[in-house]
Image (spheres, helix red, strand yellow):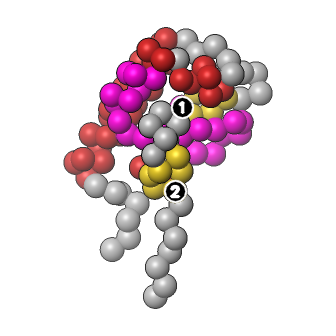
Amino acid sequence: MATRKVPMRKDILTEKMYPKREMVRIVRDKEGNISIDPTGKKSGRGAYVGLEPDAVKEAKSKKILEKVFSTKVEPEFYDELFEFVDHQKARMDLFGDLGKKH
């Protein structure tokens, strides 16, 4: 059986490449609202963030998401993103890649 190519995406905070499954998608919709997209299917301008909570803290201080999406991002969104990334990282550490087929 042929091995499948793993889709890679660039983390906008660290500029490193990671497998898409190990990242969180953030979306800016047509109205300019920024939200976390756990399904990866929301419409709008998307960007990916790796599972590194410290990078999210640094992004808050440098306002990286405001630069990427060219819109105002509330500090509360960074806090929400930090909690989501921290939770997903803990899940990954506990269970590994849940999407892998054995």
Residue 43, located in which quarter of the rendered image?
A: top right
**Horizontal arrangement in the rendering, residue 52 relative to residue 9 (left or right):** left
Mark sitting on residue 64: none
- Label 1 residue SS: strand
Residue 23 in percent (x, y) is at: 45, 45
Name which residue type carries label 1: Ile
**Disc nearer the start of the sequence (2/1):** 2
Circle 1 residues within 10 Å: few <14, some 14–19, many ≥20: some
Residue segment shown in magenta: 36-59
The relative height of residue 67 versus residue 86 in the rendered view (above or below) is above
In this rendering, the label closer to the viewer, 2 or 1: 2
- Label 2 residue SS: strand
| Residue under pointer 1 | 36
Residue 42, located in which quarter of the rendered image?
A: top right
What residue appears at the point 49 percent right and 65 percent down from the top-left corner? 6
Residue 44 in percent (x, y) is at: 71, 36
Mark sitting on residue 8: 2
Residue 87 in percent (x, y) is at: 32, 34
**What's the CA distance linking mark 2 and mark 1?**
19 Å
Furthest toward the bottom, the residue is 1
Could one spot residue 79 in this view of the protein? yes
82 or 101: nearer the viewer: 82
What residue appears at the point 38 percent right and 39 percent down from the top-left corner? 51
